[in-house]
């Protein structure tokens, strides 16, 4: 016996996934708490495996399956999402199971084929299609771009379980499979980080999903994503659904995020003075100062901070007529995430060419961030007067943000 056990999560469903305690990077997203790859086994006349795990975790998934059933008895596999953290073990498990059919969305059929140059025919299922497999009643919901073009949900009608693949998930390694068994503050943080770094660009589709859900007449009693804990208490399902709708609206919040890198501490001093200005008085605006120096603050941490912020303040000294590489890396990443509705402010120091702030200003435009004021620029080392100007700029930013929130 390997020690890996399946975990019963409902009358007929078992969790047979894997816990990745060591994951620290998910294509550029820093995952400080690891992750899980959740696969599920629906027991019945004709057992069904819903999603798989990352390829390297195949032995763990197989052992969990074997703890309750001979894998050859599984009749079908459903692939809700072709990304390889969920499909990676599909070729290997298929060789053991020899399923009658593998189901995926129409786009998923092609995506899986393009990934694995497949040995097994895959059967497409359509949005709204219902399938009766033995005593198991399923239906499928197309969720294009949440988080890939082929993504879909599977609804297990007999028990009201929505297998939601990436949606409502988070990168959080835990043995506690149900949300209420975990620290709610951690769940909120990791769910927000996941939304900010994976789903944010598709927010309009998230809102569309919530608009269309009522017409599907699903009686959802459990939401089982492919990462992180499962939601099964009514209040917890409402909580995570509510957070997703709130984040998808991309509203602005009374919070300023000040990010910078620095060469000889001049830009750092400016950052601190601007932040002090924002924090002064009674603006009631939260301020986060996040230095990129040394790599302790990750790009995905900043994406997370911006999810519930109102203004993004970014500073860089001029380096070889450009911006710091750390700042360039961050802006490249944020461009893909497309956080809407933010105000912005650019600042930086220079020696003999002030290109950095010009570049930053152009970058803000590309991010569709509206500048509060002209760039704040200091030559070499800020004087007390320069820092007073930075402080005043911070106050102006705070007032502008509050005005925008009140509109
Ligand atoms: Fe967890 Fe989009 O894969």
Image: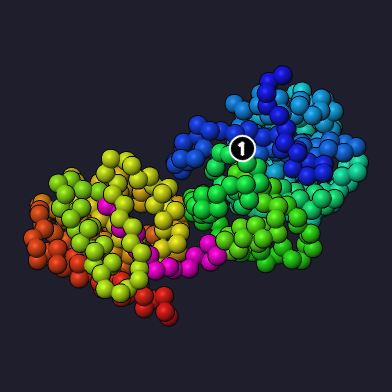
The residue where tag 1 is placed is 175
Q: Is residue 68 visible?
A: yes
Q: Is residue 92 visible?
A: no
Snapshot quadrant of residue 397: bottom left
Q: Is residue 99 left or right of residue 251?
A: right
Q: Is residue 388 left or right of residue 198?
A: left
Q: Is residue 399 left or right of residue 381?
A: right
Residue at 61%, 58% in the rendered image: 240
Q: Residue 62 placed where, x, y %?
A: 71, 26
Q: Residue 346 placed where, x, y %?
A: 26, 61
Snapshot quadrant of residue 244: bottom right
71 up-or-down from 183: above or below: above
Q: Nearer the viewer, residue 181 or 162?
A: 181
Residue at 78%, 41% in the rendered image: 13
Badge 1: how crowded within 10 Å, few (<14), some, or many (20+)? few
Whether 247 is among the magenta residues is: yes
Q: Residue 200 placed where, x, y %?
A: 51, 56
Q: Which residues are magenta?
A: 246-260
Residue at 41%, 75% in the rendered image: 405
Query: Which quarter shows the C terminus?
Result: bottom left
Residue at 57%, 61% in the rendered image: 243
Whether 176 is among the magenta residues is: no
Snapshot quadrant of residue 273: bottom left
Q: Is residue 398 left or right of residue 306?
A: left
Q: Is mark 1 within 8 Å of ligand 1?
A: no
289 up-or-down from 402: above or below: above
Query: Which quarter shows the N terminus?
Result: top right
Q: Say which element carries label 1.
A: loop
Q: Residue 235 placed where, x, y %?
A: 67, 60
């Amino acid at each position: 016996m390997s020690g890996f056990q399946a975990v019963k999560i409902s009358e007929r469903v078992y969790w047979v996934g894997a816990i990745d305690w060591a994951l620290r990077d998910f294509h550029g997203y820093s995952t400080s708490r690891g992750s899980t790859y959740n696969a599920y086994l629906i027991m019945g006349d004709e057992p069904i495996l819903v999603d798989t795990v990352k390829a390297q975790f195949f032995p763990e998934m197989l052992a969990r399956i074997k703890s309750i059933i001979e894998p050859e008895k599984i009749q079908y596999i459903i692939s809700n999402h072709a990304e390889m953290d969920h499909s990676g073990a599909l070729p290997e498990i298929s060789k053991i199971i020899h399923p009658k059919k593998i189901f995926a969305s129409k786009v998923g059929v092609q995506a899986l084929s393009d990934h694995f140059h497949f040995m097994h025919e895959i059967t497409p299922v359509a949005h709204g299609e219902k399938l009766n497999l033995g005593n198991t009643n399923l239906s499928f919901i197309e969720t294009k771009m949440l988080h890939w073009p082929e993504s879909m949900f599977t609804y297990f009608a007999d028990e009201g379980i929505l297998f939601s693949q990436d949606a409502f998930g988070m990168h959080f390694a835990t043995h506690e499979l149900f949300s209420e068994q975990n620290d709610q503050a951690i769940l909120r943080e990791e769910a927000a980080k996941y939304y900010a770094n994976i789903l944010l660009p598709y927010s309009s589709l998230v809102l569309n999903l919530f608009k269309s859900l009522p017409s599907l007449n699903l009686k959802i009693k459990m939401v089982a994503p492919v990462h992180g804990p499962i939601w099964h208490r009514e209040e917890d399902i409402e909580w995570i659904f509510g957070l997703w709708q709130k984040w998808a609206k991309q509203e602005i919040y009374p919070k300023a995020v000040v990010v910078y890198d620095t060469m000889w501490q001049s830009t750092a001093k400016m950052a601190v003075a601007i932040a002090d200005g924002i924090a002064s008085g009674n603006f009631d605006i939260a301020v986060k100062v996040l230095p990129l120096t040394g790599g302790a603050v990750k790009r995905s941490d900043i994406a997370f901070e911006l999810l519930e912020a109102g203004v993004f303040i970014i500073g860089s000294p001029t380096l070889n007529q450009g911006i710091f590489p750390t700042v360039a890396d961050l802006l490249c990443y944020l461009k893909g995430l497309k956080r809407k509705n933010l105000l912005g402010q650019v600042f930086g120091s220079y020696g003999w060419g002030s290109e950095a702030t010009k570049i930053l200003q152009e970058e803000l435009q590309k991010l569709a961030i509206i500048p509060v004021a002209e760039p704040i620029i200091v030559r070499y080392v800020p004087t007390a007067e320069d820092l007073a100007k930075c402080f005043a700029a911070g106050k102006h930013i705070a007032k502008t943000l509050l005005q925008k929130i009140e509109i």
